[in-house]
Image (cartoon, rainbow, N blue to C red):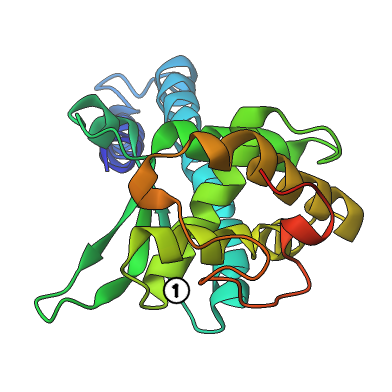
Amino acid sequence: MLLLLSLIGFLALAASIVVRWLRRRVDVLGRIAPFPAISVGLSLALALGCAVPMALEAWLEHRLEAAASEVAGVPVQVDCQSLGQAFVDVGQELGYVRWGPDGVPERSTLIKVRVCNDLRAWLASSTSDPTLDQVVAVHVLTHETMHMVGIVNEARTECAAVQRDAATAVALGASPAQAQALAVRYWTEVYPRMPSDYRGGCGPGGEHDEGRPGAPWLAGPTP
């Protein structure tokens, strides 16, 4: 919102400078005043500086939303946290889905700015050698997607996400091999360290095992 307001402000400033010049471009002696190119150019440059990150953010959200909708099987909305929101945010969660008055999760999620930055960096890379933060970022998107389809219990949500991390990675542009490797890394390096209420019943033959072909325990060791 801050960038949008700044963009509008700088464009309005450029327009006002041009209008003022048009009204006064010829003085009483008939001389034409030079066009205020520096002032207009500076205002437009500042506007462009606001527009570029807005466009990049919109592109990222579109990519994340398309992937999440594909995995969910229904249209969902994905928003990245703005810098203004991050400035006043004191929560420790990496993303969240709001619950409606009826206790049903909404089909929209807010992903924290650091996670979105990691997703952006991963998408800009070859996706073949993600950092652990990038692995977690892909999983966060999958986890929140599972909430958006209606799963409330965190252990069940986490296990459903673990079994779909590869699908999310493929939907974001990774190859099947890269996606499976990413899912295995989360399963073996991150999942065992999750809080107890996020674990349990997950693994081959477990309560939350859906028998999906993308489950990471089919390609890697069970932690």
Looking at the image, the residue that sits furthest to the top is 38
Q: Residue at x 56, y 42 (%)?
A: 191
Q: Position of residue 103 (x, y in %)?
A: 16, 76
Classify the position of the N terminus by image quarter: top left
Q: Is residue 20 visible?
A: no
Looking at the image, the residue that sits furthest to the front is 205
Tell me which corner region of the image, top left, top right, bottom left or bottom right, holds residue 137. top right
Q: Nearer the viewer, residue 7 or 211?
A: 211
Q: Position of residue 14 (x, y in %)?
A: 36, 32
Residue 19 vertical placement versus 33 (above, below): below
Q: Is residue 219 visible?
A: yes
Tell me which corner region of the image, top left, top right, bottom left or bottom right, holds residue 39. top left
Q: Is residue 141 left or right of residue 155?
A: right
The count of marks equals 1
Q: Nearer the viewer, residue 131 or 212?
A: 212
Q: Is residue 199 left or right of residue 101?
A: right
Q: Residue at x 74, y 37 (%)?
A: 124
Q: Tag 1: Cα neighbours inside 10 Å, few (<14), some, or many (≥20)?
A: many
User: Which amino acid does the dot numbered 1 rest on?
Assistant: Val
Q: Nearer the viewer, residue 13 or 151?
A: 151
Q: Position of residue 92 (x, y in %)?
A: 28, 33
**Pointer 1 residue:** 76
Q: Position of residue 28 (x, y in %)?
A: 24, 22
Q: Is residue 139 left or right of residue 128?
A: left
Q: Nearer the viewer, residue 94 or 116?
A: 94
Q: Residue at x 86, y 49 (%)?
A: 178
Classify the position of the C terminus by image quarter: top right
**Which element type, helix, strand or loop, lies under badge 1?**
loop
Looking at the image, the residue that sits furthest to the left is 101
Residue 74 vertical placement versus 48 (above, below): below
Q: Residue at x 71, y 50 (%)?
A: 183
